[in-house]
Structures are given as structure tokens and as C-alpha cells.
Image: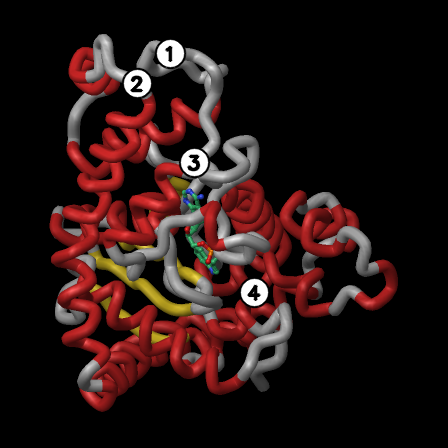
Amino acid sequence: MSRVLTALQPSGILHIGNYFGAIEPMVKMQDAGNENFLFAVDYHAITVPQDPEELRKNLLFAAAAYLAAGVDPVKTTLFQQSRVPQHTELAWILNCVTNMGELERMTQYKDKARGKGESVTVGLFSYPVLMAADILLYNTDIVPVGDDQKQHLELARDLAERFNKRFGETFVVPGVQIRKTGARIMALDHPENKMSKSAPSPKGFISLMDDEKTVLKKMKSAVTDSGTVIEYDESRKGLANLMTIYNLVTGKSYEEIAAAYVGKGYGDFKTDLAGHVSAFLAPMQEKISKYLADPEELKRILEEGAEKARGIAEAKMVEVRKVIGVTL
Ligand code: TYM
């Protein structure tokens, strides 16, 4: 049994990239009998401005979505990051063993800071340190994430090793788990970019709550190429991405998909794909709506998870405070 942990930002509606990159792998790890921790990182979300009412809504939506996707709060400790203050406490301590240069090299930071000049916030800069704290607090063995989080995970590993060297064995050095297919789902309208919730246009992503009509519209307008044969070819980025989504929602291999579309064009392929995506989402959407109808129950589940997480996190912090010399 391993300790498995991941987290997602409650910033806007979750999309199928988040689902296949992080949520589905977590549910699989849970069902395989591991000890799971899953949380909504609200303190990461506020590194960019958030409307407080929207944030509250997004937190409840995140909890509902995780449960609807198959997270069992008995087997998985499910909570809200800010309800476990040890995360920010450890982040401060880790800030003091992190070099500026390491954070300046983070590609996600560079992307988000581009054009902001001196007005970029300290929170956005030290965001990967808070993420390292999230992971190291729980003696995490495995972190399932999408491909875009790889560099942040490497920092968490480096910080664990550095801290252990300086203060003695304290943290488990976490392993990263990135799935083979679906670790980087691309934007439908710009297949050279990853599918993202912060994209300027909703055309690029399929939200977990998109209805049939919306999915069909987005699929129909998905960028492909002038080729005529439906086959998996990495250099045909748009089509390759759609075939990956097809594979994820139906379980059909690329060869099976290609065989089914011999002599057919993009039109048929996209219409069918939209149908498969909607059929995949429909049962989850129904469950999400059911969970959202009872916010008190969602809050109760999250608080129960936070209570459990606080116990584990505090035990780690007792150790950390002692080794760094602040416990008298
Ligand atoms: P976030 O909220 O941006 O994304 C949540 C998860 O979804 C994955 N993901 C994708 N996977 C495949 N294709 C995509 N297009 C795609 N877009 C996003 C992400 O890789 C991620 O696994 N910093 C993290 C949250 C975090 C965290 C942690 C993760 C905070 N603390 C501790 C793991 C452990 C983030 O912003 O993810």
C-alpha cells in the first residue's frame, strides 16, 4: 500500500484534461487499495485574482466533481487545502531552503508572469513551494499528475532531498506518476497548447459540465488539418489529440478507431466523438448535480477530511519544527 496524493485548483470549472490527467488516476489508485489524499488547493487559486463568491462556488463544485468521479471519502481523505494551516506553515519553512533561481526557471511561472513585469505577485512566484509543502507534509510516495506538473514535482523532490541533507531524514522523496496516454490533452482550438481552464476562449476545452449541444459544437470546430485519412500520427497534432480523447472515453485503441473510419471523413469522426464524450460525461454530470444540491453534506465531507489531514500534517510539523530548532 502506498500513500498517494494529488490536488487541483478550484479555479473555474474542471475540464476533461484535469479529469484524465489527475482525477481518474487517483480513483484508480484508491480502488487498488492505496491510502489516498485529494484536495482542492484554494491557496494556490488565489495566486491570481479570484472573485470570493465564485471561489466558494468552485470549491463546492470541485468536491462534487471528485465524488461524482468515484472518490470515496472513506478511502480517500478529501479536503480543502486552506482548512489545514500546516500547508502554509511548511511552505514558509521550505521558502527558506528554496533558491530564487530555481523558481525563476519554472516554465509555468514564466508563462503566467509574461508581460506582467514588476507587478507579478510573490504568491505566483513561490506557488511551487506551497505545492512541495502539500506533498511533503504527508510522506507521499506517489503523486499522479498531468505532464505540465512534472517540473513542479522535480522541485518538490529536490527540496525534500536538500532538507533531509541539511536537517536529517525528515521527508519522503515523492515519486511522480504520469499516465502514458492523456497526460497532456491539448486545446481543441489550438492543438499546440495544452487544454487549460484559463484559456481565453471556452472553445478550447470540454468542461465536465458541457451539455451535448456544446460538446458537439466544440468538436465540430476543433482544429484539424487538410489530411483525409483518420489515423494516429503525432505530427498531425489536432487529429492526434482528438484520437486520444476518443481512446480515453471509449477504451478503443488508435488502430480500432482508424479501422472504423476507413473511407470516412472528419465530419463523421467528430460527430461520433462528440457523442462518445457526451455519453461518458452524462452519468458524471447527473451525480455532480445531485451532490451540488446538498452543499451542507459536501461541507461536512470536506471538514471530516480536513480533520483527518490536520492530524497527520501536525505530526509531521512537530518533527519539522524540532529538527530546524524552533521547538524549545
Ligand atoms: P491544476 O489545477 O492546473 O491541474 C490539476 C491537474 O490536472 C492536470 N491537467 C491536465 N492533464 C492532462 N491534460 C491537460 N490539458 C491538463 N491540464 C491540467 C494537471 O497536470 C494536474 O495534475 N499546481 C497544481 C495543483 C497542485 C498539486 C499539489 C498537484 C497543488 N498542490 C500537490 C499535485 C500535488 C495545479 O495547478 O494543477
- x and y percent of residue 144 in the render? 35, 46
What amino acid is found at the position of numbered circle 1 in the picture? Thr
- Residue position for label 3: 222
> Would the CB of label 4 be found within 8 Å of ligand 1?
yes
Residue plotted at (36% across, 67% down): 39
Q: How crowded is mark 3: few (under 14 residues within 10 Å), some or many (20 or more)?
A: many
How far apart are the alpha carbons under marks 1 and 2?
Answer: 6 Å
- Residue position for label 2: 265
How far apart are the alpha carbons under marks 3 and 2?
Answer: 14 Å
Contact check, label 3 and label 2, Cβ < 8 Å: no
Q: Nearer the viewer, residue 104 or 212?
A: 212
User: Which structural element holds mark 4?
Assistant: helix
State the quadrant of the C terminus.
Answer: bottom right
How far apart are the alpha carbons under marks 1 and 3?
Answer: 15 Å
Q: Which mark is on residue 228?
A: 1
Residue plotted at (47% across, 46% down): 204
- First in residue order: circle 1 vs circle 4: 4
- First in residue order: circle 3 vs circle 4: 4
- x and y percent of residue 42 in the render? 48, 74
